[in-house]
Image: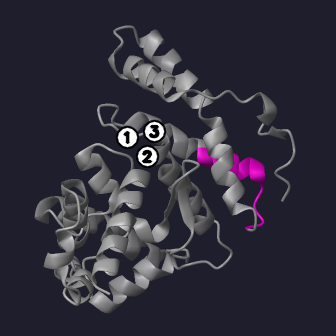
Amino acid sequence: MQYSKVEICGVNTNELKTLSESEKRELMHTMKNADDAKVRAKAREQLINGNLRLVLSVVQKFTNRGESPDDLFQVGCLGLIKAIDNFDDTLNVKFSTYGVPMIIGEIRRYLRDTNYIRVSRSIRDTAYHAMQKKEELTNKLGREPTVEELSCEMGIAKENIVIALEAIVEPVSLYDPVFSDGSDTVYVMDQISDNDSDENWIDEISIRDAMKSLSQREKNILSMRFYVGKTQMEVAKEIGISQAQVSRIEKGALDKIKKSCK
């Protein structure tokens, strides 16, 4: 696959515009709040055109899949549009922090659905039903439901639910980069809740003594991550910083704790 070509889907990549964070926020505010529908539509179009380089950078991560770059770019643009339409501009979060996972997710769904190894319709239906039910129960319970809870709710054996969900998920490495702002890189493992491992790991170290050396912000982030089980994205939204910043603070705090417990 050649990504060095100048034109993708009729777009000259050398002429793609970029927007500053302030320009993005101003356009986002106009798109959501302007009285004139034409003004809102124009702001939305400018946001899309001004973030196409973001799509291009994500597409380049899928160079080994044998897919047409034009197809991946179009699919990525769909993810970009969804991100723009659903982004909450009242939060102190960079748009790229929210947009990149949306674009990646859209491309992964496309690759999953067009995979040459076909998953049966019944298994896919079970998986999609389970995903929908999981979202409903998460909203209802305030946490992710267990497989047993999904099984009871759906009336389907938990083994069949697990098989169905695994069948539609494309394997990824925990060390695959999800986003980088140039100085901080967020990996797949940084977006995973640690509901199962926190007690086994934190209880093995002298957490109370080690925590005394941490700042209040570090304590709050570790508490939300390892006690409450929130993802870094959820923590970032709650305290009003970027996910990359949460990742950096979390890793620094854990290093302090490890050094204190040696």
What is the basis of the colouring in this image?
one colour
| Residue 10 visible (yes or no) | no
Q: Does the magenta stretch include residue 110?
A: no
Contact? badges 1 and 3 (CB < 8 Å)? yes
Badge 3 is on which residue? Answer: 95
* Mark 1: amino acid: Val
Q: Is residue 255 left or right of residue 9?
A: left
Q: Nearer the viewer, residue 194 or 168?
A: 194
- Residue 93 shows which numbered tag? 1
Going 86% across and 39% down the picture, which residue do you hit?
6
| Furthest residue in direction top, as rendered | 36
The image quarter containing residue 130 is bottom left
Contact? badges 2 and 1 (CB < 8 Å)? yes
* Mark 3: amino acid: Phe
* Magenta-drawn segment: 65-76
Q: Position of residue 30 (x, y in %)?
A: 40, 17
Badge 2 is on which residue? Answer: 98
